[in-house]
Amino acid sequence: MPHDRQHTGQKWNAGVLWLVFALCFPIMAHSQDTLSEPAWKDVKEILDKRCVVCHSCYDAPCQLKLTSPQGILRGASQQPVYHTERLSDAQPTRLGIDATTVAGWRDLGFFSVTRDPQQAEASANLIERYLELGRQTPLATNAPVPQALELAVDRTLVCPTPDQFDAFAKNNPLAGMPYAAAALGDDEYATLAAWARAGAVVPTVKTEVPEDIQRQLAEWEAFLNASDMRTQLMSRYLYEHLFLAHLHFVGDDPRRFFQLVRSRTPHGQEIDVIATRRPFDSPGDGPFYYRLRVIDETIVHKEHLVYTLGADRMARYQALFLDNDWSITSLPSYGDAEGGDPFTTFASLPARSRYQFLLDDALFFVRSFIRGPVCHGATAVDVIEDRFWVSFLDPDADLSVTDPSFLQDGAAFLELPVAQVDRGKLGDLHGLSHKNQIRYLEFRDARYRASPTHQQGFGYDAIWDGESTNTNALLTVFRNFDNASAMTGFHGAIPETAWVIDYPVFERIYYDLVAGYDVFGRIEHQLATRLYMDELRMESEDLFLNFMPRESRPEMHKSWYSGPLAQLHTYWHQRRVDDTFPNGIAYATNQPKQEFLLALLARGGGLWPLSDPINRCADETCTDLALRTIAAEPGPWAKFFPDLSVLIIETPDKEDQIFTIAHDKAHSNIAFLFHEPSRRQPDEDVLTILPGLFGSYPNFFFRVPQSQLDVFTEEVKSIATQEDYLTLVNNFGVRRTSPNFWPSSDQLHQAFAASDPLQAGIFDLNRYKDPKPDDAPE
C-alpha cells in the first residue's frame, strides 16, 4: 500500500529518491544473449556513476540496491531497514543471502522496478517514466535545490509501486532522476532511455576466475575445511571475523574480491549459502563448508573492507593457530550466548594468537566497526569524539594474553549484550551489562596491581610498536557526524582524547559492533549495543590515562567530560579515574599527552610521518602554507563547513591536487545518547586538512584554481556568518545542480581508482549538502 504521505508534496522526496535513481536501473531478467555485452557495459558505467552513488548498502532509498543485476531484479521495498523504534526484529533482506530468486524477493515484499510482463507496458516501466520525468522538469542550474526536495538522511521515505506512479508524479513533478542533482548528459540520457524502452534488460552475470586464482581458492577451501577439531575451531574464529571482508588474492586483478560464506555444498559444487542472522548462529544440523564466493557487485567505498589472502597469510594462520601447543576435546555450541561470550567460546585458542590476529590487521578491524552493517545514523557513532588517536597494548604487557587465568576468571564479566538478548527488556539488559562492566574493571585493576611485572606501571614498551614493520600499530579515527573513517598513523593536531586498546576491549568492540550487531534488530538491541560501546570507549580512554602522570589524570579526564551532567554520568558509571596506579614514564615536559603521542610516532623508525605538513608542523619549510592558515586551530569559519569536504585545486601544468577537509567538532562531552547540539562547543571547532581522499560520504566539493588558493583561504578566514559561507560556496563551491557536479564526482572516482585501485570504491552522495541562507552552522 502507498504511504499516507505520498501525495502531500512534502515527504515525497524519499520515494522520489529511490525512483529517481531507480529509474536508472529497473530491469527484467533476460539472458546475456538478449543484451549485447557492449550495450550492458555502457549502461552499467552510467548506473555506477549516476545511480550507485546513492543506491547501495542498507541505506539505499527504498532498499533499491543498484550495484548488481541481482539488486535491480530484486527491486524496491516499502519497508525501511533503519527503524529506530522497531519493537520486534525485522526479516533480514540481505542481497544474495536472504533470497536468491525474484519470486523469493516478491515473497519478502519487494516489487519490480522494471517492466513486468504480467502488466501493461505503460503502467509498469518505472525506469523509463522516471527518466522522462527528470528530463521534462530539470532543476535550475547552479541554484539551491527546491525546498520540496528534502535531503535529510533521516527523512521519511515514500516508495510508490508502479501502480502508484501516476499520482506520485502528478503531485511531485520534480521527482525525476537523478534526484535533487544536475541533469544527465544528453548521451547518458539517450543510452539509459533506449535501454529502458527496450525493457531495461540485465544480463546473467558469470564472473570468470583465472585458473591460478581457482587453484588458490581450492587450496584455501581445503585449508579451512580440514576435519580436525583444532582447524574447525580456528576456521570458525576466522569466519566470525572475516564474514564482511572483501577478500583479495595477492597478485590478482585489483578489482576482484571474494566473500567467505558458509555453504551446504563442498568445493567443486555451486555455493548454497546458509543464511543466518549473525555469523555465530548455528548453520544447522547438516554438514557445512567454508567457501569463497566471488563478489559480483559494484564496489562501494562505505562497505569496502579489503583483506588480502596468499601464501604468506596461510603460513601466518598456521603459525598463529595450528603450530602452537594447544588441544580441544569438544567444539563449542552456536548461538547468541556463544556470540556474546567469545572469550569462552574460543578459550581453547591461545589468547596471544587471537590478539595478534587482530593486531596484524588492526586497521581492517577498526574499519569494520565503521564500514560494517551500519550505513546510516548519527546515534551509531556519537559515542566517539570527532578525531582521536589509537594505539594498542603490547601483547607482552597484556595480562589477558600473558596470564591464562585472567580470561578464565574474568570471562564471566565480559559477556556482551547480545548474549542477554532474550533475557529481558532493555533496562535489564543494560543494567546487567553495566554491572558486569563495573565488576570487570574492579577485577582488572586488582589483577594488574598484583602483577609483579606491572609494579612500576606502563612504560613505552607497553605499547605495541608493530614490530617496526606494521603500520597498523597507530591509527587515527575521524567521526564525520553520522559516519566515520580510519587510517594508519597519527594525523591532524594533537587530539583532545586518545585510546589505548587491549585484547579484551578489541574483541568486545568487534563482537558488539560487527559480529553481534543486527541492523534488522529491535530497539532494545540497537540501544544496548550503543550503550555498551559507551563503556568500551571509556575503558580505552582510562587505559590511555594510565600512561599519563598520576597527578594529570583527573584533570585530563575532567576536561573530556565537562559539565554537571557529564560528572553525573561518570558517577553513575562508578568510574573514578585511577590516580594511584604507577606511572612508568619519566616525562620531560609539562605536556605529557603530546610528549607521549609524539614519542609513539618516533618509535616507528619511519613507519609513519612524524609531522603533519598542514595541521601539525612548526617548520616554515613545510608545504601547503596557504592551507595551514585555516587548519588545526579554532576559527569562526570552521563551524560553517560540512563534516567532510573535498577540495580540488586546479593546476594548469599537472594533475589537480585533491585534499579532504574534515570538520572536527568540539563537545563539552560525548557522555550521552541524545541532545548532542546542547553539548556542542562550535567556537572550538577546527578544520583538519589532509591530502588525498578519505571518508565514504563527501558532503561538498570545492574547486579552486591554484592561482586563487590564497583568495580561497582568505575568504574562508573571513567567514563569520552563513551569508559569508554562501559567498564562498558561490565563488568556489559545486552545488548539486552545478554543471560541475557530475564531472567533479567522476574526477574524484578516477583519481581514487588510479592512486589506490585495491581500496577504491564509489563514494556515497546521499549526504551531499545543498547550502541555503537559513542553514544553521554545522
Image: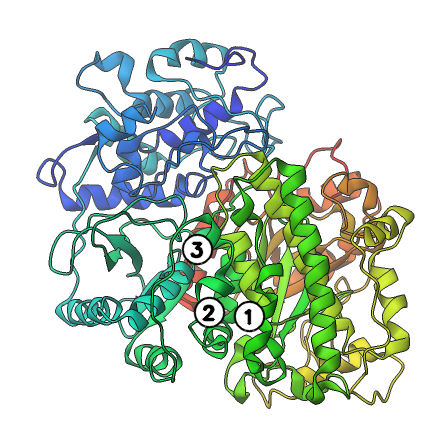
- The dot on residue 749 is 3
Callout in the foreground (3, 1): 1
Query: Which residue is disc 2 drawn over?
Result: 347
Q: Amino acid at mark 1?
A: Gln
Q: Amino acid at mark 2?
A: Ala
Residue 332 is situated, as x and y percent measured from the top left of the image, at 38, 60
- The image shows a total of numbered marks equal to 3
Q: Amino acid at mark 3?
A: His
Query: Which residue is disc 1 drawn over?
Result: 408
Nearer the N terminus, badge 3 or badge 1?
Answer: 1
| Residue that lies at the very extreme toward the left in this rendered image | 33
The secondary element bearing badge 1 is classed as helix
- The dot on residue 441 is none
Q: Is residue 320 left or right of residue 180?
A: left
Residue 765 is situated, as x and y percent measured from the top left of the image, at 51, 43
Quarter of the figure with the C terminus: top right
Q: Are marks 1 and 2 in contact (CB under 8 Å)?
A: yes
